[in-house]
Amino acid sequence: MDKPDVTRAIAAATSVAASLGLPVDDATVLHNSNKLALRLTPCDVFARVAPVGQEVARFEVDLAQRLTGAGCPVCPLEPRVEPRVYGCDGFAVTLWTYYEPVTPHLPPADYAGALERLHAGMRGIGVESPRFTDRITEAEDVVADPDRSPELADADRLFLGDRLAGLRRAIDDRGAVEQLLHGEPHPGNVLSTGDGPLFIDLETCCRGPVEFDLAHAPEAVCAHYPGVDRALLDECRQLVIAMVVAWRWERGDQFPNGRRFGEEMLRSLRAGPPWPTLDTLTGRLDGR
């Protein structure tokens, strides 16, 4: 979000919390992209704020309730207030339990075990959700429309469009078993807490093969996840890279350092295998 929107979003979250009897003297921005993640104190609440119409908060709240009820490792909603979406000044606000991080990095085995438990719980949840191919269509639409991606070079536009279409066919042709997935279980969406690893940001949930989820995780995590189809995982990693590249070139993209990230990912996609993981690409940009 731009600075004026951040100011308004913080005011909206603060107003909602105060109206519910949760005292707020300060709001710390934890993450800012198309939506804002805040820690509200002293009530110690994790707030997610997005412009109305640019979120699927009701779906996320409903799914979170179902998953926590099934014992899945997901961050629960704030228990002191009604579990729903709150509207204020054109923003949708949801309130969640805040967890103080206990370690800077999760052991890969713990990360993989939590993701495996999440997938197991999701198999028992009957909820309408998009298929992972809907995400491909979104990326293809960005790439195909110069008005939505005006700075994308013609050669890159053709390359990305062909790669997205080819990977869609290749993955579909495998006929892999599909189930409800997190959609983006990368390290930024898993918390290290005293209650173990907990996943956040459920609005990206979709149906697909588990390898689509694993394509967002570090390689060390994938090594601890049982029964992985490595060939399918490679195709899904390519797909994730191609989709993220498309989104980084979309007009109005607000991902921090998004263009640099997109350029690095495009170079990696053109370079060919071995396909890097998202954390590896992030590390390159950070100089790690």
Image: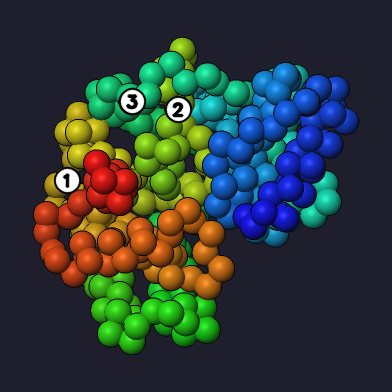
Q: How is the image coloured?
A: rainbow
Name the residue carrying label 3.
105
Amino acid of disc 1: Asp
Outermost residue toward the top? 194
Residue at image coords 51%, 24%? 70
Please rate how many residues cluster around mark 3, counting C-alpha atoms within 10 Å: few if below 14, some from 14 to 19, many from 20.
few
Is 131 above or below relative to 211? below
Q: Report if the CB atoms under discs 1 and 3 are less than 8 Å apart.
A: no
Depth check, front residue: 263 or 48: 263
Asked if one can make out residue 30 in the rendered structure from this viewpoint, the answer is yes
Q: In which quadrant of the rendered view does residue 119 lie?
A: top left
Mark sitting on residue 45: none
Q: Report if the CB atoms under discs 3 and 2 are less than 8 Å apart.
A: no
Return the disc, 3 or 2, that comes first in the chain's sequence: 3
Q: CA distance from mark 1 to mark 2?
A: 26 Å
Amino acid of disc 2: Leu
In this picture, residue 181 sits left or right of residue 17: left
Name the residue carrying label 1.
229
Residue at image coords 48%, 47%? 205
Q: Position of residue 131 (x, y in %)?
A: 44, 57
Return the disc, 1 or 2, that comes first in the chain's sequence: 2
Secondary element type, mark 2: strand
Is 254 above or below relative to 97? below
Q: Quadrant of the N terminus?
A: bottom right
Mark sitting on residue 191: 2
Residue at image coords 36%, 61%? 260
